[in-house]
Amino acid sequence: MSSMTFGQKKFTATPPDKGSFPLDHSGICKIPMLKYMVCIRSAGSDYSACKLEAREYLDCRMKNNLMATEEWKKLGFSDVDSKEGDKEN
């Protein structure tokens, strides 16, 4: 049967709002990602307890062109202080 059976509408894919989020095939940001995942697991899936680790992971991705550079405030990290501070953003 085709997808048009019984009056079903054809699915039209839309791109994400922020663009693509390329995979880290070479493992450039593997260490910050693992730190974040360990924190999430130890915090019982409470992501708010792991904001510093999430920020470090996203910072690594931005520095290595694995995602577009964005202001921390727009990503929800305006209240988190990093070890390095806000040198770039």
Image: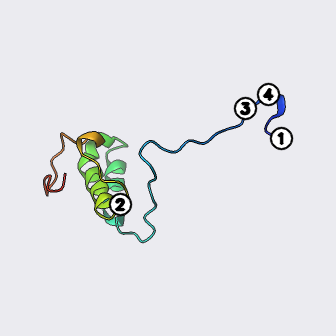
Q: Position of residue 26 (x, y in %)?
A: 42, 72
Q: Mark on residue 34?
A: 2
Q: Amino acid at mark 3?
A: Lys
The quadrant where residue 1 appears: top right
Q: Is residue 76 above or below residue 24?
A: above
Residue bearing the label numbered 3: 9
Q: Position of residue 65 (x, y in %)?
A: 35, 62
The residue lying at 80 percent from left, 35 percent from top is 4
| Mark found first going from the N terminus, 1 or 3 | 1
The residue lying at 34 percent from left, 64 percent from top is 29
The residue lying at 31 percent from left, 58 percent from top is 62
Residue bearing the label numbered 1: 2
Assess disc 2: are there few (<14), some (14-19) or many (≥20) residues with their C-alpha within 10 Å of its C-alpha.
Answer: few
The alpha-carbon separation of the residues under discs 4 and 2 comes to 46 Å
The residue lying at 14 percent from left, 56 percent from top is 87
Assess disc 3: are there few (<14), some (14-19) or many (≥20) residues with their C-alpha within 10 Å of its C-alpha.
Answer: few
Q: Is residue 11 above or below residue 81?
A: above
Q: Position of residue 34 (x, y in %)?
A: 35, 60
Residue bearing the label numbered 4: 7
Under circle 4, the secondary element is: helix
Q: Are marks 3 and 2 in contact (CB under 8 Å)?
A: no
Q: In this view of the protein, can residue 15 be seen by the observer?
A: yes
Under circle 3, the secondary element is: loop
Assess disc 1: are there few (<14), some (14-19) or many (≥20) residues with their C-alpha within 10 Å of its C-alpha.
Answer: few
The alpha-carbon separation of the residues under discs 1 and 3 comes to 11 Å
| Mark found first going from the N terminus, 3 or 2 | 3
Q: Amino acid at mark 1?
A: Ser
Under circle 1, the secondary element is: loop
Q: Amino acid at mark 4?
A: Gly
Under circle 2, the secondary element is: helix
